Amino acid sequence: MFRMAGNRRRWFRYSLRQHIAAATAGIAIALSLGISYLAADISKNQIESREGAAFASHAHHTAEMLDRGMFERYREMQVASVLSDISDPAISIDTKRKVLERMQGSFNAYAWVGICDANGIGMVGTGKYLEGKDLSQRPWCTQGRDKPYVGDVHDALLLAKILPNPSDQDFYLLDVAAPVRKPDGTLLGVLCGHIFWDWAEEMLNLSSNASTDTLLLGKDGLILAGPLPARSMLADTAPETMAAIMKLDTGFLLETWSDGKTYLTGFARANGYRDYPGLGWVSLYRQDVDIAFAPARDLQKRILLLGLGLGLLFAVIGWFQAGRIARPIQAITNAAKNVAGGNLAYTAPAIHADKEVEELADSIQQMTSTMSHEINERKQAEERLRKISEAVHQAGEGVIITDRYGVIEYINPACSDITGYTPEELIGKTPAILKSEHQDPGFYKHLWQTITAGEVWHGTLIDKRKDGVLYPALMSVAPIRNEADEVTHYVSIQQDMTGQKKLEEQFMQSQKMEALGTLVGGIAHDFNNMLAGINGNLFLAGNELKGQENVRQRLKQIETLSYRAADMIKQMMAFARKGAIHRTVINLSDQMQEVVKLAQAAIPESTQLILKLDKGDLKILGDATQLHQIVLNLVNNAQHAINESVHPCITIGLEHFEADREFMAAHPEMHATAFAHFYVEDNGCGISEANLSRVTEPFFTTKAVGKCTGLGLPMVFGAVQSHEGILEIDSTEAQGTVVHIYLPLQDSGEQQAFEHRERSRVIHGNGEIILLVDDDQSVLDVTREALESIGYRVIVASEGRQAVQVYSEHAMDIALVLMDVVMPQTGGVEAARQLRQINTQVRIVFMTGYDREQFSQDDALLEQNTVIQKPPHIETLATILAELIAQSR
C-alpha cells in the first residue's frame, strides 16, 4: 500500500509538460497498437482460410497420387493373373518364376511376387521364397480367390526372416492380389504382390518441404507415415483434427498438438481410383503457425513502426503546446516547494495567467499562513506521542491496553514474553484469559470496582501463562480519560515476579547451606581427630584383651560405629559443598542387596517390607557410602511416615529404566537415556502440597523439636545431585509417598573399581623408625602406641618446624614420615617442602581430618604423596606403611 503511494508520488514528479507530451504520444501509439493487432487478426483469418484450403487441396492431391499408384499395382495383378504363362497349369514352375521376376523388376517396390495354389500352398515365388509354404491363412490367399484383393499396410514377420534386409530394420508391406484361373475357368491359385511400404513414404517425401509436414493415416487414425511415431494414434496427438477427419472427407483447422505447438492443418481422405476401391487412407498436410502467419506478423510490425513515428511527432507537438500551460503552474509549484520545505514565510511572485491559475496561487498563499501554526503544534504533539509509544513498546514490564469494556486492544512485546501469547492471540479478548483461579471472584470484583470508579488499582496476583504455568505478578491498572474526562480505556502494567521469587528462594537456600557448611567445616577436623584417638585406643585395648572375645567384639562394634561417624562427616561435608565424593563404577544391584540387609534391621517386624530388586547388571558411577546413606535416610523417613498406619508397608524397588520423550522433556539437563531407577514407597501419612516443595530444604521439618534434624531428604537430594541423578517425590496426604531416584547407567564394558585394601590382618614392621608429626597430643600418643605395637620404632614431633629439626638430625635412620596436614605455625605441606630439601627421596604419608580434595587442589605436593583420612584404619595404615618402606629399599 505504501509502495503504491510512493510510486504515485514519483509519477507526479514528472512535469505537466512531460505528461501532455507523453499522453499525446501514448494515444498515437495505442491507436497504432490497436490497428496493428486488428490488421494482424484480419490477416491471420485470411491466411488461415487461404492457406488452409491450399493445404487441404495439397492433401487431396497426395491422397489421389497414392490411390493412382495403388491402382496401377491393382490393375497389374489383374492383367498378370490372366497371362497364359501364369494361368496355364502346363507351363513349368521355372517359366512362371521368370515371368514373376520380370514383373518384380519392372517395379522396384515389389518385395515379393508369388502364387499360392488352390489349397493355399506356395506354388512359385520370386527368389523361390515361400515355395512349398502353407499360406492358406494369409488374408490375400483367402480373400483373393474370388476377386482382386488389396491389403492395408502390415508388418512382414515371415518375409522379414527370409528376404534380404541390408538395413536390418523392421519393414512393412502392402498386399495386392488377384485370382488365377485355368483356361477352363477353375481356380488355379492366387497371384499376390507384396509392396514395400517405403514406396508410400517416398511419395509423401516428394510432397513435403522444409516448412511443412505430410502425414498418412489409416482409416481409423493410425499413423502410417510421417514425422510422428509410426503405428501411434492421431487422436492421442491432435484429438480435434481427428474428430474433424471422422466427420469430413476434406477440410482444414487450427489446433495445438501434444508437442505444444499450434499447426494449421489440411486433410483429405482417399476414395479410390476408377475400379480400385481404396483403403480409406487420409493424407494430412500441416505447418507451424509461426511460419504460416509470418506475413501477418510482418504487417503488424510495419503498422507498429508507423505508429511509433506518429507518436514521436505528436509528442513533439504536445511538448511545445504544454510549455505555454506549464510555465505559470511551475511558478506556483516552486512556491509550494518552499512551503513544503518549511519556509512558510515565502511570498509567491505575482502570477499572470489564466483565471483559474491565478486563483490557485492566491489560495496557496492564504493556506500557508494557516498551516504554519497547525504544523508546529502537530509536530510537538507527534514527538511527545512518539516518545510515549516507544517507551511503552520497549518497557520491560508487560503493558495491556483495553477498551472501557475490558477488551484488549494492545499489548507490548514484554507482555508477550511474560504470558506466552502473541498479540494476535490476545487482541480482541479480555484479560480473563490469564486467570489462574488462585484469586477468588471477590478479588476481581474489587479490582473492577476500583478502576471503574476512576481510581488506580495496585496489587499482586497469580496469573497463568499460555502453557499453563503459573507465575506471580505485581500489577497496576489505571483508567485512561478523553478530553471530556470520560474513561475510554484502561492500561495495565504487569511485572513478572518469577525471577525475583527464585532469587529470594536461592538466597535463602544459600544462606542455609552456608550456615550448614560453616558448621560442618568447623567441626570436621576436630571431630575426626577425636575419632582418630578413639579408634587408636580401641585398637590398643583390643590387642591387650587376650581371650576375652566378647569384649573384643564389643570394641570392634564401637570401632565400626566410629568409622561410620567419620563417613557421615564426609557426607555432610560433601552435602555442604565442603568435601568431594570418590565415585567408582558400582554394580547397584549388588550394592542394594547389601544395603537393604542393613536397613531391614531398622524396620520393626510389624511393618511389611516388600523388595522388588532387579538382580541384573545395573552399573553406575557412584560413592558406596553416599548410596548407603541415601537408602538408610529414605527407609528411616518411610518408617516415621507409617507410624500411624493400620497396616504399615514399605516397598523398596530397583529396576532398569529407559527414558521416554516425556521424561527427557521434563529433565532437559540430562544427557543419559538409560537409568537405574531406585524407589522407596510407603503407605504412610503422605506430604501436603504446601510442604512438598520444601522437603529438600536444609533443616525443614514438620516434626516436633528434637524429633528430626531436617537434614535427611536434603542430604539425599545433595547426594543424588553429586551423582548427576534425578530425585522425584510423588505424595498424597493420607495415602503415602514414593521417592524416585534415577541414576545414569555406565557402559557395560566398565569394571567395578572399589577402593579396597585388605584389612583382615595387620602387617607388622621390623623395627623401622617412623617420624610421627601431629599437633593433637591425644592423636600423637595413641598413634605412637599403635605403631609401636605393630613393630615400629617411633620418633614424635608436635608441629612442622620441630619435625624438620628432628628429621635433619636422624635423616639416615628415619624410614618414613607420617604427618598431619593442618598444624599451627608450620603446617604439614610447608614442612614437607623443607624435608624434600634435606632428602629428595623422603617418604611422606599425610593424615588429615579435612577432605583430601580441598588440599589436592591447592598444593601439587600432596598429589605426589599418599594422603589418608582421619581416623585411619590401623590395618590400612599398616599396609600403606609396609608398602612404602618396601619401595624405598
Image: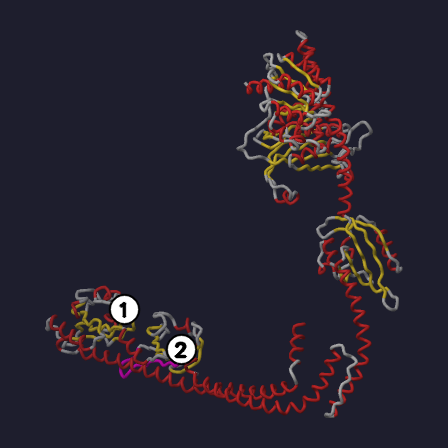
Q: Magenta span covers which residues?
A: 263-278
SS at circle 1:
loop
| 608 displayed left or right of 752 | right
The residue that disc 2 covers is 246
Question: Is there a contact, CB below 8 Å, between mark 1 and mark 2?
Answer: no
Could you tell me residue 64's position as x and y percent?
A: 31, 82
Picture quadrant where residue 596 is located: top right
Q: Against 380, is 818 above or below?
A: above
State how the image is colored.
secondary structure
Could you tell me residue 196's position as x and y percent?
A: 25, 72
Q: Amino acid at mark 2?
A: Met
Which one is nearer the viewer's eye here, 418 or 639?
A: 418
Could you tell me residue 491's position as x and y percent?
A: 81, 60
Question: Cα distance, mark 1 to mark 2?
Answer: 28 Å
What residue is rendered at 87% in x and 57% in y? 456
- Residue 171 is tagged as 1
- Residue density around tag 2, few if under 14, some if 14–19, many if 20 or more, within 10 Å: few
Is residue 1 shown to the viewer in this render?
A: no
Nearer to us of marks 1 and 2 is: 1
Q: Against 603, is 399 above or below?
A: below
Which one is nearer the viewer's eye here, 22 or 860?
A: 860
Q: Does the magenta portion include 275?
A: yes
Q: Does the magenta portion include 805?
A: no
Q: Earlier in the sequence, mark 1 or mark 2?
A: 1
Which image quarter holds the C terminus? Answer: top right
Q: Against 762, is 46 above or below?
A: below
Picture quadrant where residue 68 is located: bottom left
